[in-house]
Amino acid sequence: MRSAVLHLKPLFLRCFTNRVSPTTMPCFSEQIGALADQHIVHVACGESHSLALSDRGQLFSWGAGSDGQLGLTTTEDSVAVPRLIQKLNQQTILQVSCGSWHCLALAADRESPCHVKLLRTQKVVYISCGEEHTAVLTKSGGVFTFGSGSCGQLGHDCMNDEVNPRRVLELMGSEVTQIACGRQHTLAFVPSSGLIYAFGCGARGQLGTGHTCNVKCPSPVKGYWAAHSGQLSARADRFKYHIVKQIFSGGDQTFVLCSKYENYSPAVDFRTMNQAHYTSLINDETIAVWRQKLLEHNSTNTINGVVQILSSAACWNGSFLEKKIDEHFKTSPKIPGIDLNSTRVLFEKLMNSQHSMILEQILNSFESCLIPQLSSSPPDVEAMRIYLILPEFPLFQDSKYYITLTIPLAMAILRLDTNPSKVLDNWWSQVCPKYFMKLVNLYKGAVVYLLRGRKTFLIPVLFNNYITAALKLLEKLYKVNLKVKHVEYDTFYIHEISSLVDIQEDYLMWFLHQAGMKARPSIIQDAVTLCSYPFIFDAQAKTKMLQTDAELQMQVAVNGANLQNVFMLLTLEPLLARSPFLVLHVRRNNLVGDALRELSIHSDIDLKKPLKVIFDGEEAVDAGGVTKEFFLLLLKELLNPIYGMFTYYQDSNLLWFSDTCFVEHNWFHLIGIICGLAIYNSTVVDLHFPLALYKKLLNVKPGLEDLKELSPTEGRSLQELLDYPGEDVEETFCLNFTICRESYGVVEQKKLIPGGDKVTVCKDNRREFVDAYVNYVFQMSVLEWYTAFSSGFLKVCGGKVLELFQPSELRAMMVGNSNYNWEELEETAIYKGDYSATHPTVKLFWETFHEFPLEKKKKFLLFLTGSDRIPIYGMASLQIIIQSTASGEEYLPVAHTCYNLLDLPKYSSKEILSARLTQALDNYEGFSLA
């Protein structure tokens, strides 16, 4: 015998070998590493081959395979062809297909266990080996054989060898419960008929058929056989019968263990023999036993024994099975077949103080053995359940163990080969959202922990490796979530990033890296750039990135202008010198025409410069406030529905591009530029557009939900069409693939598809109708107007940074928030002159302000800041300034919008203050330094 195996425990499979001489007795054993992660429940050996069966019905084989007894066919890629050719010698077949090499290895020896994938779905429960052939029994009572068939021992009515597992057709329709293999023959027991079938070599009478010929098909063994007494109760000769308990074969012999009718003992069912192994290996009972042993015998041997079990991935993989008896066979690349709730419950019990010794051993086992030894290429999907189990261990959530548990697990997951990595992605797609969120929060916590303690790492490479592992695992989870939507996208946001990282410097590093440039030496050492993982940035952090990008491009434009100015001075042409700012001279009474004129004379590079606006006849210096008012007034004029550029939807108070418009394209182009300039210059503007606009700018296709926002009535009607349960859709709704639109009092019918007026909407095509309807509103009908708008917007604000935003974040950045926190406005206010938070006039002011209705408060924001909305950074970022003046009570408050500064006279009463402030708000228009 070249090799043999011993199944010492349900947890470990060891192989006895002798590396000195194949003829001597085995001298030592070692664990089979390839099966270390598997919960093995049964093994069988032939002359030179071995097979092992896992608790999930997966079969592994290794050893000699010259006759196909391993049931394997292997396809290797071209990289392995030379090595494989040398290894397999004459047993290799080569073929060329589509210009690439494929290697098909048949009947090859295997040095380590290989998965018999052709039997993956057959629910194998038992295996038996002959000298050079193998038989397997399935849960349903089917029999598959493969290997040498020279004597007919495969039962396929021929003497051919079989490389692939093949079902014994003669036994189909019969439920086999026992199989056994001799050297060159096979037995099968069918309890329903009480028959024992034999096939293969019969030279020594081992088949029991009454002759010594070989048999190619299953033939009944002669004798009086029965499976149980119930089959004999009505027979007068029942005492002649033998009730079969179990069949055995070995060499050229066959044995039947049986009993007489009067001493009835039921037959063994091989399909249920291993059910004891399908229970959880780690449970309350085993925990109690280990605890007792550790208390009574706290010796090195006892501790090592417990550690050995707890360090075995097979031990954990074989635990926490699904409750249903057959569920363990359903493990697949899409179904883990594990009860994570049981895992959670057990780990929670272990956190009890009475189990402290066990908990310590588990921790040590995970840290020192189990996680470091996880394979990058598990033998089968069953071995991957450990990746779902480990995160349930509560200590993974403890920051003390991030470096020894959490990060090493991330590294092990990232080391997985392509196929097992995809399997884990599939399993993550199937877990409950609560588990998934816990996993996301775990690695978000690890990132924050590492960022806070980065200065404590004496070796920067360690920090880089650790944080890269955590970030890449989050990225892997994020990609899974894009498909299954377990959690909202903002679940991945790490809000602490803004306070822990210099976003400007991080963005600069990322920008230089993307451009293929080298950063300054002090930065190079910290090679990890968080901007490579934009999904962790919240809206505020992304806005900071966009502003950094804007400042960077502005600086490039300014430097270019300054360089040209120097050149002009040297060539004595100072009149051609360029301004480092984008300066717009406009008149209030011709705002649109002046803006079109001014922007048309500037190049694309000029649009990247900081914006300065000058209103003719006004002496205000633009430090931000004049620009804010310019945007507000210009957009208010351009978006006015009287021009017919936009359609106003009354039930949503929103605007959308009109599908019939007579203004020139450059008007839409101008609106796009103005919106881009607003973002580029960090100015909040009031745009009443639906989320669909921001989706389109980010190449996200609008859907029915967007139509519900823009036109709630139309959206609800289309939803009712989709939800209608009846079959009579045509008669009930009377629709075809057209849409009616009113233009200047005339109703027109537009076709949603070619020939749409002749296509009736029915139950089968209503989804296509809704999609076409939505597509018409947001795409087809507004294509040329939107294209002009987007080209203007992207001319100023396009780029990779913009793509990092979610549509809702882009909207918030452009138009600000409307989630007002008036108390925060008061708390962050700054006082100058004689004023403080406790000054009587200041108290009167805030009492009066908080009594204002919402619209009046918004009007105050407009008066003071130039916009009635809040920047994306929140109310605190406004930081208004209130200063005292020497003016008397008869004067009104004055707003310096450029600085968010309010000159507030010292009013003596609440009534006077309220009257003066209201008068100032009602008469607000324009800017002045007075």
Image: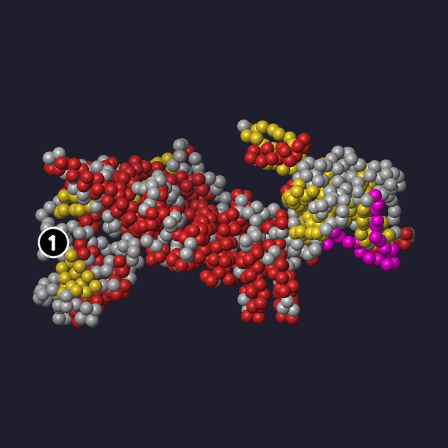
Magenta segment includes 350: no
* Quarter of the figure that contains the N terminus: top right
Q: Which residues are magenta?
A: 252-274
Residue neighbourhood size for the residue with mark 1, other residues' Cα within 10 Å, grouped as few (<14), some (14–19), many (≥20): some
> Residue placed at 12% from the left, 62% from the top?
892
Please, what is the three-letter code of the amino acid marked with disc 1? Answer: Ser
> Residue placed at 46% from the left, 61% from the top?
399
Q: How many circles with numbers are drawn on the protein?
A: 1
Residue 216 appears in the figure: no
When the figure is inspected, residue 651 is found, relative to residue 579, above or below; the finding is below
Q: Which residue is mark 1?
A: 928
Q: Image quadrant of residue 148?
A: top right
Q: Position of residue 400 (x, y in %)?
A: 47, 62
Q: State left or right for residue 3 relative to residue 104.
A: right
Q: Position of residue 186 (x, y in %)?
A: 79, 43
Q: State left or right for residue 878 relative to residue 29.
A: left
The local secondary structure at tag 1 comes to loop
> Residue placed at 62% from the left, 29% from the top?
94
Question: Observer-nearest residue: 778 or 329?
Answer: 329
> Residue placed at 76% from the left, 49% from the top?
25
Q: Image quadrant of residue 774?
A: top left
